Image (tube, rainbow, N blue to C red):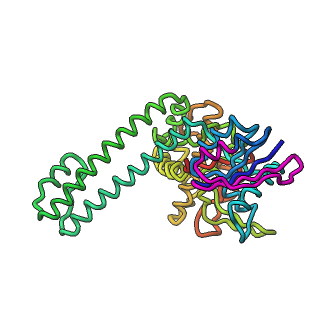
């Protein structure tokens, strides 16, 4: 069995081949597109295994290489940096290291979702970009009014507010800015509705959406993002591992009796983490069990409010994963005894600038997901 390490680039890619004894038998550079790289790999003597680092388009490359190779392994880029720290780095050396890790069966593997799930995730991220553009245009309109010493009316973005904006007597230049910004705002809002319509069609085909939306505060946007990014709930060995995946666990530096906990890691999909925190605020307001958990972590200290909401979002993520695995509907008002016991025992201490020491802050045992890159 040959082991092939690839360092993939847009125009230049490096290829390293090891034999069954771990000795390098071939190393070359392929100039051209990914199609030319795939044609070159197809000419290699088989059987062979392929390993490459996850980057933009890793899912497409995995789909193209899977029919050719005995096995395709996609490596986690962040974990590779921890394994190979060196001041000398180039494409040739990277291909060698990937081939050696594949030979040793020590590749930190990532989860590669299907093409449908990748497209679903991309559409979710595209909607977030449109939302960001809408916020930017609204801020520009407010800046225009503030620069002219005008105070906007209440409900500025309603029909009444739009009519008020269009009726303002402005100079020719400021009037031109207003018209362009209002037209752009209308176009962006139309695009958002179009994207949300397609997202709803996709979400309607997943039974897990109904389960997750039974949680107070969890709407269709949070539920669809969680289902899309989790993909296969069985890939997590333990429920607690989902906290590491979404980056809601604190950074840890422990040595001897000292255990320093700092900011949350912020690993994984940022969109899912943002939506979970927003849903946590709503869940605290609507569910008695979530409110008790939030207040227990906050300890009547206003400075711990952000810590408490991150802890609640972490708990919400664990709860949602458990519901997907067990197929159970949320039982309103009932809080987890285990979470309450851990919260009371640990006290959600903070020794760093921010971030709660979430229970079960362990790294996933199985493949690590790398999202937001396709």
Q: Where is residue 116 shown, x and y percent of the image?
A: 54, 35
Q: Nearer the viewer, residue 183 or 53?
A: 53
Q: Is residue 3 left or right of residue 234?
A: right
Q: Check the image and report above or below for 87 versus 206.
A: below
128, 8: nearer the viewer? 8
Q: Is residue 71 visible?
A: yes
Question: Would residue 202 appear left or right of 297 to someone viewing this image?
Answer: left
30 inside magenta stretch: yes
Residue drawn 10% across and 60% down? 169
Quadrant for the N terminus, please. top right
Magenta residues, start to end: 11-40
Left of 180 or right of it: where is 278?
right
Q: Nearer the viewer, residue 125 or 163?
A: 125
Please say if 138 is above or below 37.
below
Q: Position of residue 129 (x, y in %)?
A: 42, 51
- Residue 74 among magenta residues: no
Spot the residue most to the right: 21
């Amino acid at each position: 069995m040959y082991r092939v390490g690839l360092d993939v680039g847009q125009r230049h890619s490096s290829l390293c081949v090891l034999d069954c004894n771990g000795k390098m038998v071939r190393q070359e550079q392929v100039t051209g597109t990914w199609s030319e790289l795939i044609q070159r790999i197809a000419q290699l003597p088989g059987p062979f295994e392929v390993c490459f680092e996850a980057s933009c388009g890793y899912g497409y490359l995995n789909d193209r290489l899977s029919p050719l190779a005995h096995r395709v392994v996609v490596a986690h880029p962040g974990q590779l940096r921890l394994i190979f720290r060196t001041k000398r780095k180039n494409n040739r050396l990277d291909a060698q290291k990937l081939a050696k890790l594949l030979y040793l069966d020590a590749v930190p593997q990532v989860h590669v979702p299907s093409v449908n799930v990748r497209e679903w995730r991309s559409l979710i991220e595209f909607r977030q970009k449109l939302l960001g553009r809408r916020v930017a245009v609204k801020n520009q309109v407010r800046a225009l009014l503030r620069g002219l010493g005008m105070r906007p009316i209440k409900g500025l973005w309603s029909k009444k507010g739009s009519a008020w904006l269009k009726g303002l007597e402005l100079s020719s230049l400021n009037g031109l800015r207003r018209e362009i910004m209002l037209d752009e705002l209308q176009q962006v809002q139309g695009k958002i509705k179009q994207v949300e319509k397609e997202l709803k069609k996709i979400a309607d085909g997943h039974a897990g959406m109904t389960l997750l939306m039974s949680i107070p505060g969890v709407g269709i946007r949070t539920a669809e993002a969680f289902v899309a990014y989790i993909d296969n709930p069985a890939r997590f060995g333990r429920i607690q591992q989902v906290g590491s995946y979404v980056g809601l666990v604190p950074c840890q530096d422990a040595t001897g009796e000292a255990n320093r906990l700092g900011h949350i890691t912020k690993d994984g999909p940022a969109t899912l983490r943002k939506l979970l925190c927003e849903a946590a605020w709503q869940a605290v307001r609507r569910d008695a069990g979530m409110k008790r958990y939030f207040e227990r972590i906050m300890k009547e200290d206003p400075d711990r409010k952000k810590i408490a909401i991150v802890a609640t979002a972490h708990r919400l993520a664990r709860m949602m994963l458990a519901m997907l695995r067990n197929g159970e509907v949320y039982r309103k008002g009932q809080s987890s005894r285990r979470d309450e016991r851990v919260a009371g025992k640990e006290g959600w201490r903070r020794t760093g600038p921010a971030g709660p020491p979430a229970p079960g802050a362990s790294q996933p045992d199985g493949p690590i997901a790398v999202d937001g890159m396709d």
